[in-house]
């Protein structure tokens, strides 16, 4: 592989106009496609195989007029102090508002006055109107949401307190500023790393081109493939991070080759042949992790994974072809490693800085590596104990999906949630929808009554409404209000209790029951994600383990990489639990309401962080492997790998942390949690696992680290990530030149 990529890098360097033209053409084509593509309808959300989804599908078939899976809004009214919502003026204003909401959008299926549906609190201070839409919250337009907000704003002018809950106002959080922050931090880190504006600018330019092609392609295909806005958000986040990283490694290796005295075309070829090989395999691990999300069998998550994986593939191809082309354009403006441009203090006499000619500069990476090699056991114990302590909160991990109670206190959704809790009880914020399939019942009406009677006897049930039948009278809808809040464990237990009672109901009456609604759907999604975690982990880690065996030609190094990753993810999850579930340092990160951890968090962190962690592993350890293959002792190979790779890996990790940490400032609890979790996971993995535990373990193992059974060595393909083939060819050329040189007498 190294030889092929070496030739590809030299070709791109020589034919730089052609290479650049191809990528500009692809960017233009993707941009034109995105601009001319029809506006995509919001992606539908379905969870195949869950009871909640089966109930929605049944209602869609038998009672489409109910819009069971449509968006919902709850308009909560609170009278001024000393008044009641039933007072004549207040009642008239509430009825007027409900009528205006119904008339404000064609998508409103139903809007019930609180005085008709009898949703007025006992003390008369609070009431709420339920609004249901014909389409899901993801399919609502901005005009529909604006109509709802304008109507409620007018109602506030009368003196009533009016807040809106439900998923109708749910919209994707704006993240534009976070990407700008990440890019700005990345630019500063790159300038510090390279000491040159030109060298620092190349990774940023190529990453933006790659993200532009990827996101534009997703936009162009969104309508045809039913891709939601979250798909492009994840692709942008991952593509930007890995795009900068991959380009960073190749530019860094190019400068290193220049420092060894090679001409620019040869340096570009060798940079792509060596660092480019590591980029290919690092990219493959990220792609495996993202494509593996299909194991969860949630269509939206699968599409997000495939789209983000496509953006990673584009980032790899750009790093292998566009980077050497741009290096050709840059010419002498990209300086060899160790040199800085005059703007950053370059041109000083090296001897004045105490650097001896012919000896490599003792950078911080070198000094740290030598310390670890001298004291591997101490470093290993400190690292494991530290990460183990951070992982302790995982034992108390509670998973769930956030409801309006997790929103910031300044939002109307959170205010509506609190008003309903105070006026009616927390369970009214998440009523359960029980669907009775009465087709097999001898007496459908009696069977529906039996369902109501059975459910009302269960623990944690506050109220049960009378059954509502479809036109054919073969399906009934019953609303069940729990005593506890939607995200509480008691509500989850109630859902399971209702489902457990289904067998007895079927036996007695022939009716079948299913529990659905937003709360039940959240519980089913959490369960589905929990069930998929271990198979997903086994698939991703297993495939990556096999891939790393091929890369490193070792059993113990890939095993160490996988175990280190698991340790860093557990520590990161522990930190997430401590901050977002327990509230430790919550005010520092803007956590206003503690609660269960988002159920998608573990599997999402495993997928994203595993791919990125293997990036650092491949880039750092391949340089050690390269030094070892070229004849250095194991301990010295570790130091050499750190001398060349530690600074670059650290810069890459800081960039990644900055990109993810920018999302901590989001007002959305879910986005904030994802940003914090990914940022802390990258910190643990890059600076504790890869920078401390990896060299410590390799120092303890010595030559055994690179052991591979002979039969497996013969069976595995030789991908030559270390560029041994390039070195051998160069040595043969040198020997041939020496033979041709006439002897001096």
Image (cartoon, grey):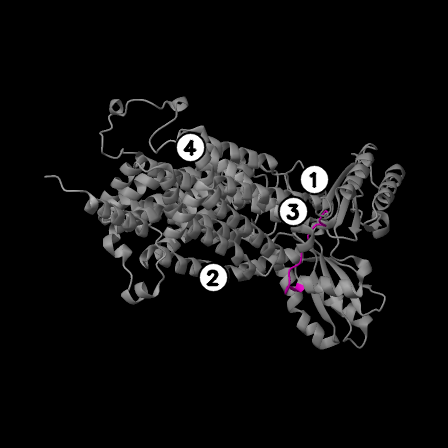
Identify residue for label 1: 415
Q: Position of residue 224 (x, y in %)?
A: 68, 54
For the residues labelled 1 and 4, say whether their Cβ atoms are less than 8 Å apart: no
Comparing labels 2 and 4, the label whose residue is closer to the camera: 4
Between 645 and 444, the one lying in front of the other is 645
Q: Quadrant of residue 123?
A: top right
Comparing labels 3 and 1, the label whose residue is closer to the camera: 3
Q: Position of residue 523 (x, y in %)?
A: 62, 57
Identify residue for label 3: 219
Q: Is residue 465 left or right of residue 277?
A: right
Q: Does any portion of residue 426 appear in the rendered image?
A: yes
Is disc 3 placed on a helix, strand or loop? helix
Find the magenta span and give its range.
39-51
Q: CA distance from mark 2 to mark 1?
A: 43 Å
* Predominant SS of the magenta segment: loop
Is disc 4 placed on a helix, strand or loop? helix
Q: CA distance from mark 3 to mark 2?
A: 30 Å
Please tell me which of labels 2 and 4 falls first in the chain: 4
Q: CA distance from mark 3 to mark 4?
A: 36 Å
Is disc 2 placed on a helix, strand or loop? helix
Comparing labels 1 and 4, the label whose residue is closer to the camera: 4
Q: Quadrant of residue 209?
A: top right
Say which mark, if any, is on residue 539.
Answer: 2
Q: Position of residue 432 (x, y in %)?
A: 70, 58
Identify residue for label 4: 331
Between 571 and 351, the one lying in front of the other is 351
Please tell me which of labels 1 and 4 falls first in the chain: 4
- Residue at image x 51%, y 49%? 312
Asked if residue 361 is positioned above or below residue 631 in the image, the reply reads above
Callout 3 crowding tier (Cα within 10 Å): few <14, some 14–19, many ≥20? many
């Amino acid at each position: 592989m190294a030889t092929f990529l070496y030739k590809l890098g030299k070709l791109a360097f020589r034919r730089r106009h052609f290479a650049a033209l191809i990528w500009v053409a692809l960017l233009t084509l993707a941009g034109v496609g995105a601009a001319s593509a029809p506006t995509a309808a919001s992606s539908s959300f379905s969870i195949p195989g869950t009871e909640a989804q089966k109930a929605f599908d049944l209602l869609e078939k038998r009672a489409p007029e109910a819009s069971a899976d449509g968006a919902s809004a709850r308009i909560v009214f609170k009278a001024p102090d000393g008044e009641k919502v039933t007072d004549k003026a207040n009642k008239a204003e509430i009825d007027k508002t409900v009528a205006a909401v119904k008339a404000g959008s064609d998508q409103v299926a139903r809007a019930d006055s609180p005085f008709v549906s009898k949703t007025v609190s006992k003390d008369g201070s609070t009431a709420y109107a339920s609004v249901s839409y014909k389409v899901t919250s993801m399919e609502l337009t901005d005009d529909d949401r604006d109509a709802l907000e304008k109507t409620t704003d007018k109602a506030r002018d009368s003196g009533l307190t009016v807040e809106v809950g439900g998923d109708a106002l749910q919209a994707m959080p704006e993240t534009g500023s976070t990407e700008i922050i990440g890019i700005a931090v990345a630019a500063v880190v790159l300038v510090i790393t390279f000491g040159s504006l030109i060298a620092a600018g190349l990774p940023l330019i190529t990453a933006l081109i790659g993200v532009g092609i990827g996101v534009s392609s997703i936009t162009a295909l969104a309508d045809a493939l039913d891709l939601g806005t979250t798909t492009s958000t994840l692709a942008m986040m991952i593509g930007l991070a890995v795009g900068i990283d991959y380009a960073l490694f190749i530019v860094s290796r190019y400068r290193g080759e220049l420092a060894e005295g090679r001409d620019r075309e040869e340096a570009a070829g060798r940079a792509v042949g060596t660092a480019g090989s590591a980029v290919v395999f690092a990219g493959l691990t990220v792609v495996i992790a993202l494509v593996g999300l299909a194991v969860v069998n949630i269509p939206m998550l699968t599409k997000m994974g495939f789209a983000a994986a496509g953006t990673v593939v584009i980032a790899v191809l750009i790093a292998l072809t566009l980077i050497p082309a741009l290096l050709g354009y840059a010419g002498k403006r990209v300086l060899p490693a160790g040199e800085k441009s005059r703007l950053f203090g370059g041109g000083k006499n090296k001897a004045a800085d105490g650097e001896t000619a012919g000896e490599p500069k003792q950078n911080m990476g070198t000094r740290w590596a030598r310390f670890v090699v001298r004291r591997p056991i101490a470093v290993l114990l400190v690292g494991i104990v530290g990460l183990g302590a951070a992982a302790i909160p995982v034992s108390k991990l509670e998973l769930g999906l956030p409801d309006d109670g997790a929103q910031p206190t300044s939002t109307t959704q959170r205010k509506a949630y609190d008003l309903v809790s105070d006026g009616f009880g927390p369970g009214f914020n998440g009523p359960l929808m029980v669907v009775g399939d009465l087709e097999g019942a001898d007496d459908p009406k009696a069977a529906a009554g039996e369902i109501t009677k059975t459910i009302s006897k269960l623990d944690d049930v506050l109220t049960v409404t009378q059954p509502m039948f479809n036109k054919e009278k073969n399906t009934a809808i019953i609303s069940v209000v729990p005593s506890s809040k939607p995200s509480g464990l008691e509500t989850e237990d109630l859902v399971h209790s209702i489902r457990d009672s289904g067998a007895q109901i079927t036996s007695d009456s022939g009716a079948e029951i299913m529990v659905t609604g937003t709360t039940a759907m959240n519980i089913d999604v959490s369960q589905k994600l929990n069930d998929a975690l271990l198979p997903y982990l086994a698939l991703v880690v297993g495939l990556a383990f096999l891939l790393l065996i091929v890369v490193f030609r070792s059993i113990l190094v890939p095993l160490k990489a996988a175990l280190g990753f698991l340790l860093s993810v557990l520590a990161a999850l522990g930190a997430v639990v401590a901050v977002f579930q327990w509230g430790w340092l919550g005010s520092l990160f803007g956590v206003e309401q503690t609660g269960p951890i988002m159920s998608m968090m573990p599997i999402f962190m495993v997928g994203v962080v595993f791919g990125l962690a293997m990036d650092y592993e491949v880039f750092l350890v391949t340089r050690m492997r390269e030094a070892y293959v070229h004849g250095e002792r194991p301990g010295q190979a570790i130091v050499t790998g750190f001398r060349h790779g530690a600074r670059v890996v650290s810069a890459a990790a800081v960039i990644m942390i900055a990109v993810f940490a920018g999302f901590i400032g989001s007002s959305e609890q879910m986005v904030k949690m994802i940003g914090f979790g990914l940022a802390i996971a990258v910190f643990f993995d890059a600076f504790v696992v890869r920078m401390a535990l990896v060299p410590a373990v390799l120092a303890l193992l010595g030559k055994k680290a690179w052991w591979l059974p002979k039969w497996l060595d013969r069976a595995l393909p030789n991908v030559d990530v270390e560029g041994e083939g390039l070195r051998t060819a160069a040595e043969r050329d040198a020997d041939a030149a020496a033979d041709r040189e006439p002897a001096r007498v």
